[in-house]
């Protein structure tokens, strides 16, 4: 009897060390949002001139998906802004740490990249001394009082979500497809060059230089009634001088119509540095609010169609981590600097869209900066992988990350935890075009691939 009792005790002590695993702690989830619409009259970024807002088509929001499991916790914030530099991300994180109980272990701030939002701080976003070298580099003005409100309201939404998180019993991933609203915007021309947005029905166009990623994914949190939609497309459909979140607002509205008003919808923009809505074969297509609405509602239809399927139920396993990657700045050649100086002196097309943007060439030639750090992130939720990078990432680089990731599928978000401009792949630099010019791409051609290697490495560590 004593021997049997002793064996029972030993077995109880050793069981946790052997093949029998302890039950995973429950996954908690929550959604919160804040209205971050600026006052009228503020500058609107997205083009090459200052626009002052004259109205509001739909409110700009900061939407929070909060997840916690055991010691792991993450607040993934999606902001209706064109981008957000690392200093502003840092301010939000500091305010979250000060106010949220419990404060999330990770705070990731993603921007949808709407071109009809408010003006984020620009100082230091190109180089630390841009305005010293070329004072008129950034059009528009930053409303510092509004920026303070963005920090306070966004952190407040994170704090509320952390306090309200409750158990999520069923997370599923649903994959759909939408191949009609997004278009590869770089084209090979008859002269062999690559041009961005070459114009509708341009007879010099041979073919697109690449392909879009037509996949649309929906993360469905059934208990908490949260739907997170992931798709890659530039939100630059509305134009004009009225604040708007662009097509993601219409997507959210239509998806809630289909699922029920109690559902909360959050949009995450996948890698879309070379993807926009312009169909150059359609001479009748017009940008504006109506086109934005059409695109948003078409994406909602694709999401609802995907949700009608069974999807993949994801195991309740949450883990996220990030690392910093040194990114080296480009240096124009002496001939390019001489050309830039001559263009500015004579007015000979100094702000060329598909060519040499003279102010950027001068800044990169004269800046004291040599390198900047980029924060690259990776997350696993069950068998689903998510990577984040702080720039307008080319779709080819996202495919590179997915190919090396142990998780299927893996999606890649741009403009998360920073806004470091366009990040083409090496071939994109060789091809040229707007995205590869000095104004757009200020880092060396291996940068995107180095970010991809970092993201892949992080994802592998989450296995």
Image (cartoon, grey):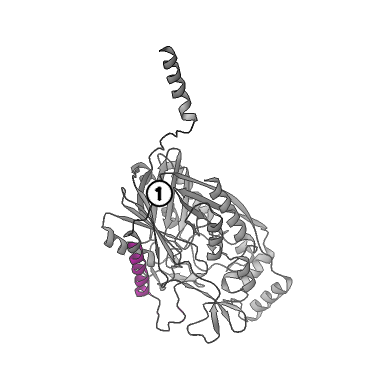
- In the displayed structure, would residue 162 be above or below residue 359? above
Among all residues in the image, which is located at the extreme top? 2
Name the image quarter holding residue 217: bottom left
* Side (left or right) of 113 relative to 364: left
Q: Secondary structure at mark 1?
A: loop
* Side (left or right) of 268 relative to 187: left
- In the displayed structure, would residue 199 be above or below residue 274? below
Q: How many marks?
A: 1
Among all residues in the image, which is located at the extreme bottom? 203
Name the image quarter holding residue 186: bottom right
Image coords of residue 57 (percent x, y): 34, 68
Q: As rendered, which of 213 and 124 lies closer to the eye?
A: 213
Which corner quadrant holds the N terminus? top left
- The answer to whether one can see residue 35 in this image is no
Residue 286 within the segment the image draws in magenta: yes
- The answer to whether one can see residue 11 in this image is yes
Residue 318 within the segment the image draws in magenta: no
Q: As rendered, which of 62 and 69 lies closer to the eye?
A: 69
Image coords of residue 331 (percent x, y): 69, 65
Label 1 sits on residue: 314
Task: Classify 10 Å Cα crowding around label 1: few (below 14), some (14-19), many (20 and above).
Answer: some
- In the displayed structure, would residue 432 be above or below residue 445? below
Q: As rendered, which of 86 and 13 lies closer to the eye?
A: 13
Q: Residue at x 42, y 56 (%)?
A: 78
Image coords of residue 154 (percent x, y): 41, 51
Image coords of residue 32 (percent x, y): 35, 50
Magenta-highlighted residues: 277-304
Q: Residue at x 59, y 52 (%)?
A: 454
């Amino acid at each position: 009897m004593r021997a049997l009792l002793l064996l029972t005790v030993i077995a109880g002590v050793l069981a946790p060390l052997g093949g029998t695993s302890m039950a995973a702690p429950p996954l908690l989830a929550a959604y919160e949002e804040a209205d971050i619409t600026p006052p009228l009259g503020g500058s609107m970024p997205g083009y090459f001139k200052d626009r002052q807002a004259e109205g509001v088509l739909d409110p700009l929001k900061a939407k929070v998906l909060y997840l916690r499991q055991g010691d792991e916790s993450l607040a993934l914030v999606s902001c209706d802004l064109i981008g957000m530099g690392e200093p502003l991300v840092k301010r939000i994180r500091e305010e979250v740490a000060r106010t949220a109980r419990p404060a999330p272990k990770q705070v990731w701030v993603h921007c949808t990249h709407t071109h009809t939002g408010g003006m984020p701080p620009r100082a230091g976003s190109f180089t630390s001394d841009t305005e010293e070298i070329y004072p008129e580099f950034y059009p528009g003005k930053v409303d510092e009082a509004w920026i303070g409100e963005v920090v306070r309201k966004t952190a407040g939404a994170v704090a509320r979500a952390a306090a309200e998180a409750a158990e999520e019993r069923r997370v599923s991933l649903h994959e759909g497809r939408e191949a009609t609203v997004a278009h590869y915007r770089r084209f090979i021309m008859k002269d062999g060059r690559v041009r961005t947005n070459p114009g509708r029905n341009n007879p010099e166009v041979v073919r697109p230089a690449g392909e879009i990623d037509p996949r649309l994914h929906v993360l469905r949190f059934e208990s908490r009634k949260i739907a997170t939609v992931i798709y890659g497309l530039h939100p630059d459909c509305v134009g004009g001088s009225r604040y708007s979140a662009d097509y993601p607002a219409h997507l959210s509205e239509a998806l809630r119509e289909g699922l029920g008003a109690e559902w909360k919808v959050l949009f995450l923009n996948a890698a879309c540095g070379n993807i926009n809505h312009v169909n150059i074969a359609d001479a009748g297509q017009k940008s504006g609010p109506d086109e934005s609405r059409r695109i948003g509602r078409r994406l909602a239809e694709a999401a609802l169609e995907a949700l009608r399927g069974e999807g993949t139920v994801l195991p309740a396993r949450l883990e996220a981590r990030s690392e910093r990657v040194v990114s080296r700045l480009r240096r124009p050649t002496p001939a390019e600097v001489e050309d830039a100086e001559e263009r500015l002196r004579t007015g000979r097309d100094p702000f060329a869209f598909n060519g040499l943007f003279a102010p950027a060439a001068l800044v990169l030639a004269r800046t004291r900066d040599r390198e900047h750090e980029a924060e690259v992130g990776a997350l696993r939720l069950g068998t689903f992988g998510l990577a984040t990078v702080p720039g307008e990432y080319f779709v080819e680089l996202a495919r590179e990350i997915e190919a090396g990731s142990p998780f299927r599928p893996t999606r890649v978000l741009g403009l998360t935890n920073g806004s470091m401009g366009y990040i083409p792949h090496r071939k994109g630099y060789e091809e040229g075009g707007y995205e590869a010019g000095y104004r757009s791409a200020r880092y060396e051609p291996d940068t995107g691939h180095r970010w991809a290697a970092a993201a892949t490495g992080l994802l592998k560590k989450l296995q």
